Image (cartoon, rainbow, N blue to C red):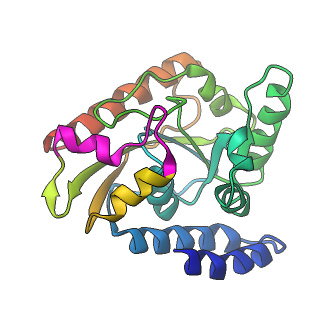
């Protein structure tokens, strides 16, 4: 993974200086390579919308979500501001055009304008409205504040995304296994990474839900509630091995 990252950094750094979709496409290529190195297989159900910009809304249970969703979705991540200072991870995030937010009162206006500017420029954005990671056995309540962006002048299409890790070493993931895949609370990153690397392979199933065009919902609270319900139901069906409704 270190070798792959060192090869990818100068390529992405060069692409960032040029116009066009190359930087977004190569970011997906990078995450696909990381997934392959980790032994993370990806199953995708559904399709991406044809319209742009798109605001993807996903549940969140692990740092692995960044790898899996980064490989599938042509989007910029939105991350907490302190991630920018993490060794190596911060550099990778910046090269991937991650938007860092602190949610502090004095900077929220500027951060909102940056997000709106990205959408207006045609970039897609991925948000985790739970605001933190779960233990993988449930979807935490969404914060409707995240959905203010859906009503900005860029008028993005909003697509719900459910992600569940459903196979571990070729076997269905049981409830007790999810603590091994999820990264939450005060877990340290390095031990969690090494624990996963002892496994042969694991799989994430990603469901791309029906896109919500602008104007369907009157306000951020009804939009938040609708997407939370859809993602929670889809994730529960995946965890339980039931057909998607």
Between 234 and 186, the residue placed more toward the observer is 186
Between 14 and 146, the residue placed more toward the observer is 14
Residue in view at x 34 percent, y 54 percent: 46
Residue 188: percent from left, percent from top = 49, 44
230 is higher (above) or lower (below) than 7: above
Q: Which corner quadrant of the image does residue 24 belong to?
A: bottom right
Q: Verify whether residue 147 appears in magenta.
A: no
Residue 111: percent from left, percent from top = 79, 35
Q: Magenta region: which residues?
A: 174-189
In this image, 129 relative to 119: left or right?
Answer: left
Task: Let me know if residue 48 appears in the view.
Answer: no
Residue in view at x 28 percent, y 33 percent: 137
In this image, 172 relative to 12: left or right?
Answer: left
Q: Verify whether residue 177 appears in magenta.
A: yes
Q: Which corner quadrant of the image does residue 78 belong to?
A: top right
Task: Let me know if residue 214 appears in the view.
Answer: yes
In this image, 53 relative to 224: left or right?
Answer: right
Residue located farthest toward the front when viewing the structure as drawn? 191
Residue 62: percent from left, percent from top = 43, 45
Callout count: 0
In the picture, the quarter occupied by the C terminus is top left
Residue in view at x 37 percent, y 43 percent: 182
Residue 125: percent from left, percent from top = 62, 47
217 is higher (above) or lower (below) than 82: above
Residue in view at x 64 percent, y 82 percent: 7
């Amino acid at each position: 993974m270190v070798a792959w990252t060192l090869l990818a950094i100068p390529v992405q750094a060069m692409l960032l200086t040029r116009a066009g979709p190359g930087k977004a496409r190569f970011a997906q290529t990078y995450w696909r390579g990381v997934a392959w190195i980790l032994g993370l297989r990806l199953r995708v159900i559904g399709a991406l919308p044809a319209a742009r910009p798109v605001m993807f809304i996903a549940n969140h249970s692990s740092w692995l979500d960044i790898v899996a969703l980064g490989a599938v979705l042509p989007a910029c991540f939105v991350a907490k501001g302190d991630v920018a200072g993490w060794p190596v991870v911060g550099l990778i995030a910046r090269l991937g055009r991650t938007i860092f937010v602190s949610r502090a009162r004095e900077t929220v206006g500027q951060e909102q304008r940056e997000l709106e500017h990205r959408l207006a420029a045609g970039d897609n954005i991925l948000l985790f409205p739970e605001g933190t990671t779960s233990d993988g056995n449930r979807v935490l309540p969404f914060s409707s504040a995240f959905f203010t962006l859906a009503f900005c002048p860029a008028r993005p299409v909003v697509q719900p995304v459910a992600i569940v890790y459903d196979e571990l070493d070729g076997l269905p993931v049981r409830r007790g296994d999810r603590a091994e895949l999820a990264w939450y609370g005060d877990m340290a990153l390095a031990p969690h990474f090494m624990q996963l690397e002892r496994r042969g392979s694991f799989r994430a199933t990603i469901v791309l839900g029906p896109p919500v065009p602008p104007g369907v919902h009157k306000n951020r609270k009804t939009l938040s509630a609708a997407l939370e319900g859809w993602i929670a139901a889809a994730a529960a069906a995946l965890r339980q091995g039931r057909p998607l409704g």
